[in-house]
Image (cartoon, grey):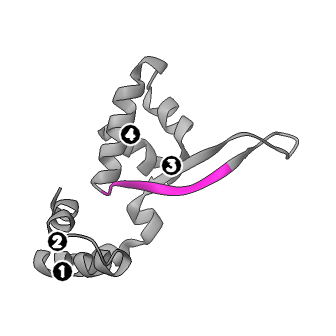
Amino acid sequence: MKILNDVVVENDCLPLHEIKRLAGFKRDDKSKFDSALNDLQMRMYLTIHSIKQQISSKGTEYGWSVTNFCTTEHFWGEAVFEQAAKISTDEAEEKITERVIHLNPSAQEKKIIKFIRG
C-alpha cells in the first residue's frame, strides 16, 4: 500500500496503468493492487483526479478512458486539511450527517453513522 502512495506522491498525478507499472505490480497482482488502491482511497490518501480519453501520437482519441489519481492534498489543496484539523470529531460527524440528510432525506441515522465511522 505504501509503495502505491509513494509513487503518486512523487509524480503528483498519474493514470492507473502508470501507478501499477511504477509500483512494480504485475498482472497476477490485480487483486492485491485493487485492494491497496481502494484502501488508500477509503483512508483519503488518494483520490480520482480525472477520467480522460487516451490520445494517440497522431492526436486522436482511442480505447477506453483512463482514470488518473492524485493525493487528496493535491486535489483539494492544503487549506482544506488545515480547516478540517480545527474542528472536533463530533462537529465533523454532525456536518457529515447534515450533508447526507440534505442529499438523502430518507437516510436512516444508524446507516449514516455506519457510513461515517465504518
Q: Amino acid at mark 2?
A: Glu
In primary-sequence order, the first of circles 1 and 3 is 3
Circles 3 and 2 in contact, beta carbons < 8 Å = no
Helix, strand or loop for disc 2: helix
Q: Amino acid at mark 3?
A: Asn
Work out which quarter of the rendered image holds the C terminus and state it. bottom left
In primary-sequence order, the first of circles 3 and 4 is 4
Q: How many marks?
A: 4
Crowding around mark 2 (Cα neighbors within 10 Å: few <14, some 14 to 19, many 20+) is few
The structure residue drawn at horizontal position 18% and vertical position 75%, both measured from the top left corner, is 93
Of badges 2 and 4, the one in the foreground is 2
Q: Main secondary structure of the magenta part?
A: strand
Residue picked out by circle 2: 109
Left or right of 58, for residue 62: left
In primary-sequence order, the first of circles 4 and 1 is 4
Residue picked out by circle 4: 4
Residue picked out by circle 1: 94
Residue extending farthest front: 106
Q: Is residue 95 above or below residue 46?
A: below
The structure residue drawn at horizontal position 37% and vertical position 72%, both measured from the top left corner, is 78
Does the segment drawn in magenta span residue 50?
yes
Residue 92 in picture, x, y percent from top left: 20, 77
Residue extending farthest top: 28
Q: Amino acid at mark 4?
A: Leu
In primary-sequence order, the first of circles 3 and 2 is 3
Residue 16 in picture, x, y percent from top left: 52, 41
Q: Is residue 74 above or below residue 64?
A: below
Residue picked out by circle 3: 11
Rendered image quadrant of residue 117: bottom left
Q: Which residues are magenta?
A: 44-52
